Image: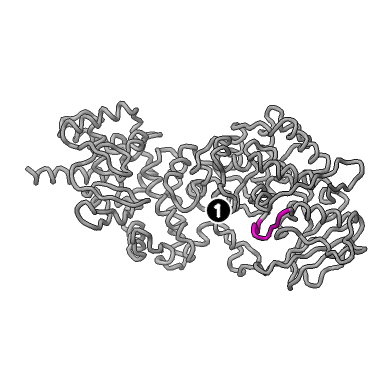
């Protein structure tokens, strides 16, 4: 037990394993392999050394910055730890570590407003600890990183002479987390349990900041992104508390990858109430959400938020950038921010020519930008065909094309911008570049974008519903085959669309399961389709004829349809497999018409 004040309750130094500490502080501290057991004791001892209440015995070394010294960034920003400790999403065993950490922190000079703390980096190698008339200074040499973090603790009125090896230094933020606030929060949590969770606060933050709802939930849980050593990232109990599925929360975590450790701390440093008891009052988390939205928008700018249904559709698309970033690309094409993974471009050690890269268009043509290029060319036909008329993401597609063409015209090699690597399905780079270039220049893209601009579809209707985009053709099919309108429309969709799953068809057509089932039964009765169960098809009726399997993310489909859609097939017989699906080779009115014409020709040949 130690105390910096005889009038305070002493901190109880519990024996925490290093993995318990780093797991509880995941996303806030780094360098899991650099932490040893009982590191909280070492942090507390550093505080007593700064305060002058502990002096090493002769032969005993002074304090060394614990772990990899990443914890020093919590100075003035410990509010993020407090929020996580109060959250009902935090696992009880991690909450105990966090509470013990906050109890320790409350007894150190790190919460003393009279002390001035500065953080920086030193050149050279070697660790040291100094305490003199200028205060205290610490450096830790991390050989694996070739890094040397530096901490200064300056009592009132003291100024430490500039260190000759100093690379840079900055004053620590002074935010929420006074001694009294920390002790009161810990006491309230121990007395009342964690604060109440409020799903309405999640919606408020999501709408105000433009984040997805899973990302907003993670932020309000004090867990805005995480390191890979936190396994599992969220367990079943945590997911249940947040109210989201595993895939949704993983996408939210990826979305928050734009935040590094320092960004996570800075975002939540000052969002807790002056009196921590407000967290347990009605609307308490909503008030935290409002302050968090203000902090987010000040750092990242407010971004437009897609409709929830559109975000869910983007999530199902499975692009290599988060669903929210894909939607933002279409909602604000000119200023689409860099998604997670490109933060290295902004590091001070990067070459000057990389420092001002702010949007995805600035990195088009870079060797590691294939995930962005893939997202653009996956997203354009998706927005056109799979989102309803009037959807703001769909409406942004023509502007995405305009900006993309501007990028291609600025001197970059089109092959460089449109490139992709060899995929697991064996798609060659040259073939993909050629398709992308042809799609942009042969009029196909222009005709799709013209369909969006013309706004011929009624609001809320889908281009993938032939009753909306080619009603005359539906009538022709119905008359020719002596079918009602619903089976005629479904037949066109089965003839044409790559993924006419039951879920998709009902969404596009606005059908109930019973109405869909009735339409399918009529087609089966007429012998136009067959009933079957096939892996990853998501439907129970199929066109007669050979079938092509596929590995994710490509969809399996009827071989005849694959040729219509320009897919490349490999193998023969039951081993046929879709190897490449370039996207829509025409507008859906064109493809519906061609599919119907081909089916009539095939039937005539059969006769």
Which image quadrant is residue 456 in? top left
- Answer left or right for 56 relative to 323: right
- Answer left or right for 387 relative to 210: left
Q: Tell me what residue is drawn at x 78 percent, y 52 percent.
A: 41
Image x and y of residue 473, in percent? 22, 37
Q: Is residue 34 magenta?
A: yes
The magenta-colored residue range is: 30-37
Q: Which residue occupies the foreground of this view, 464 or 131?
A: 131
Magenta stretch prevailing secondary structure: loop
Image x and y of residue 40, in percent? 75, 51
Answer whether residue 420 is visible to the viewer in this image.
Answer: yes
Element under disc 1 = loop
Image x and y of residue 183, in percent? 80, 39
Q: Which residue occupies the foreground of this view, 38 or 569?
A: 38
Mark 1, residue position: 337
Answer whether residue 220 is visible to the viewer in this image.
Answer: no
Query: Which class describes the residues within 10 Å of circle 1: few (<14), some (14-19), or many (20+)?
Result: many
| Count of marks placed on residues | 1
Q: Is residue 47 magenta?
A: no
Q: Tell me what residue is drawn at x 68 percent, y 29 percent.
A: 283
Q: Which residue occupies the foreground of this view, 136 or 595?
A: 136
Q: Tell me what residue is drawn at x 25 percent, y 37 percent.
A: 541
Which image quadrant is residue 172 in? bottom right
Q: Which residue occupies the foreground of this view, 54 or 465?
A: 54
Which image quadrant is residue 293 in? top right
Image x and y of residue 25, in percent? 67, 49
Q: Tell me what residue is drawn at x 57 percent, y 53 percent.
A: 228
């Amino acid at each position: 037990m130690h105390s910096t004040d005889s009038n305070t309750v002493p901190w109880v130094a519990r024996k925490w394993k290093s993995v318990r500490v780093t797991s509880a502080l995941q996303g806030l501290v780094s360098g899991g392999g650099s932490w040893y057991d009982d590191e909280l004791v070492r942090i507390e001892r550093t505080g007593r050394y700064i305060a002058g209440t502990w002096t090493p015995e002769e032969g005993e070394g002074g304090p060394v910055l614990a772990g990899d010294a990443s914890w020093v960034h919590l100075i003035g920003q410990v509010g993020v730890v407090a929020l996580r400790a109060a959250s009902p999403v935090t696992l009880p065993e991690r909450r105990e570590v966090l509470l013990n950490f906050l109890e320790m922190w409350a007894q150190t000079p790190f919460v003393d407003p009279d002390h001035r703390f500065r953080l920086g980096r030193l050149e050279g190698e070697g660790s040291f600890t100094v305490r003199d008339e200028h205060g205290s200074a610490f450096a830790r040499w991390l050989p694996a990183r070739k890094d040397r973090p530096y901490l200064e603790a300056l009592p009132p009125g003291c100024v430490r002479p500039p260190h000759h090896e100093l690379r840079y230094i900055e004053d620590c933020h002074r935010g929420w987390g006074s001694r009294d606030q920390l002790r009161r929060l810990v006491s309230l949590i121990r007395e009342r349990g964690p604060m109440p969770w409020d799903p309405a606060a999640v919606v408020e933050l999501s709408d105000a900041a433009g984040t997805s709802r899973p990302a907003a939930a993670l932020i309000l849980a004090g867990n805005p992104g995480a390191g890979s050593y936190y396994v599992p990232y969220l367990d079943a109990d945590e997911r249940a508390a947040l109210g989201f599925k595993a895939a949704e929360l993983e996408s939210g975590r990826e979305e928050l990858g734009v935040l590094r450790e320092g960004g996570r701390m800075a975002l939540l440093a000052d969002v807790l109430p002056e009196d921590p008891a407000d967290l347990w009052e009605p609307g308490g988390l909503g008030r935290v959400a409002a302050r968090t939205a203000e902090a987010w928008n000040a750092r990242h700018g407010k971004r437009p938020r897609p409709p929830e249904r559109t975000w869910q559709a983007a999530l199902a698309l499975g692009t290599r950038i988060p669903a929210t970033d894909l939607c933002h690309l279409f909602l604000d094409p000119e200023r689409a921010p860099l998604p997670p993974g490109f933060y290295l471009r902004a590091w001070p050690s990067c070459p000057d020519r990389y420092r001002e890269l702010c949007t995805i268009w600035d990195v088009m043509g870079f060797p590691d930008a294939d995930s962005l290029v893939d997202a653009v060319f996956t997203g354009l036909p998706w927005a056109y065909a799979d989102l309803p008329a009037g959807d703001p993401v769909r409406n942004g597609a023509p502007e995405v094309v305009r900006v993309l063409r501007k990028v291609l015209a600025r001197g970059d090699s089109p092959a460089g911008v449109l490139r992709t690597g060899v995929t697991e399905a064996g798609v060659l780079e040259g073939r993909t570049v050629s398709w992308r270039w042809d799609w942009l220049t042969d009029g196909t893209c222009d005709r799709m974008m013209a369909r969006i601009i013309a706004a011929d579809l009624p609001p809320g209707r889908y281009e993938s519903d032939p009753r909306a985009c080619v009603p005359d053709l539906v009538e022709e099919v119905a008359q020719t085959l002596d079918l009602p309108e619903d089976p005629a429309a479904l037949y066109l969709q089965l003839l044409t669309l790559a993924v006419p799953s039951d879920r998709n068809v009902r969404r596009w057509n606005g059908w109930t399961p019973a109405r869909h089932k009735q339409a399918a039964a009529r087609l089966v009765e007429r012998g136009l389709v067959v009933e079957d169960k096939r892996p990853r098809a998501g439907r129970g009726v199929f066109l007669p004829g050979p079938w092509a399997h596929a590995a994710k993310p490509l969809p399996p489909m009827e071989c005849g349809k694959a040729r219509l859609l320009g897919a490349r097939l490999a193998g023969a017989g039951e081993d046929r497999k879709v190897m490449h699906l370039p996207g829509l080779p025409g507008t859906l009115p064109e493809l519906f018409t061609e599919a119907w014409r081909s089916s009539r020709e095939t039937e005539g040949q059969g006769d």
